[in-house]
Amino acid sequence: MKKRSYDQYCPLARSLDLLGERWTLLVVRDLIAGPRRYTDLRNELDGIPSDLLTQRLRDLEAAGIVARRKLPPPAAASVYELTDRGRELEPALVGLARFGIGLLEEPPSPDDPPSPERFGLLLRVLFEEDDAPEKREAVLVDDGERRLRVEFGAGRFGVEEIVGEARDVSATLRGSVPDLYEVLVGRRELEDALESGALATEGSEQAIARFTASFPPPQAVAVA
C-alpha cells in the first residue's frame, strides 16, 4: 500500500507524512526512555498488531530516526533506540503531551498504572524548569512496586528506575500512581494526601516541598 502524503511544501506537512501514521509517535515515545527490544515495545504498546509494529520500526529506521543494535553476549538480543535525529523529537512530544494533560479527566487506573517509562514521561511533562530549585537534587518516588529516582533542578530533569539502593536522594515520596498523579497535577493538596495516609514521605520535608513545587498544575484544555 502506497504511503499517503499531504504533498505540500511545508515542514510540518512533511513531518506529518513521516510521523502522522497511527502508532508511530507512540513508538518514538516509548523509545525516549531508552533502548527497547521488539518484545518490550510489543508489550508496552498494548493493541498494536505485530506486523504493524514491524512496519513502523522499518519506516523509522529508513528515516534515520530509529536504529537497531545487537547487544553483546550473553544478551544475544537486538534493541531499537533513537538516533540523534530521533532525539530531536523529544521536545515536540513533550509539548504535545503537555497539551494532552489538560484532556485527561481522570487519574491513572490503580489496576493498570503507567509503566515506569511512561510514568517517567508523565513526570517530565508536568515538570516546569522555571519552578524548580537552582540547586540540583534527587527524590525517590516509590509506588510500592517500582522506584523511580527523579533528579531535578539547575536546568536538569531525569528519571531512572532503581532496583537496588537509591543513591544521593534527599527524600522519598511513597504512594500509588493515581494518588501521586492527583497531587502533582494540583487536584489534591500534598498535606491532605499525607494526613489521609494516601502518601507518605521520608527524609527532607523541604526537598519534598521543592519537588512538588516543580510541578505546577497544568492548564485545562476546553473541548467542545
Image: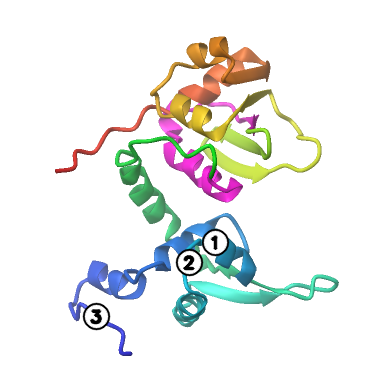
Instruction: Decide if residue 214 is in sight here.
Output: no
Task: State if disc 3 and disc 2 touch (CB < 8 Å).
Answer: no
Give the residue type that dot 3 points to.
Ser
Element class at badge 3: loop
Q: Residue 109, position in %: x, y?
A: 48, 39
Give the residue type that dot 1 points to.
Leu
Residue 224's place in the image compared with 107, above or below, is below
Depth check: 144 or 17 in front? 144
Pick out the residue farthest to the left: 224
Q: Which of pointers 2 and 3 indicates the residue nearer the eye?
A: 3
Give the residue type that dot 2 points to.
Gly
Q: Which residue is mark 2?
A: 86
Q: Which residue is mark 3?
A: 5
Q: Residue 117, position in %: x, y?
A: 57, 50
Name the residue located 45 percent from the left edge and 77 percent from the top edge.
52
Element class at badge 2: helix
Element class at badge 1: helix
**Left or right, 75 with reference to 173:** right
Q: Which residue is mark 1?
A: 31
Span colored in magenta: 113-142
The image quadrant of residue 106 is: top left
Name the residue located 52 percent from the left edge and 16 percent from the top edge.
193
Give the CA distance from mark 2 to mark 3: 20 Å
User: Which sits earlier in the primary sequence, circle 2 or circle 1?
Assistant: 1
Q: Residues within 10 Å of mark 1 (few under 14, many from 20)?
A: many
**Left or right, 178 with reference to 142:** left
The image quadrant of residue 72 is: bottom right
Give the CA distance from mark 1 to mark 3: 25 Å
Magenta stretch containing residue 22, yes or no? Answer: no
Q: Residue 112, position in %: x, y?
A: 53, 45
Magenta stretch containing residue 125, yes or no? Answer: yes
Task: State if disc 1 and disc 2 touch (CB < 8 Å).
Answer: yes
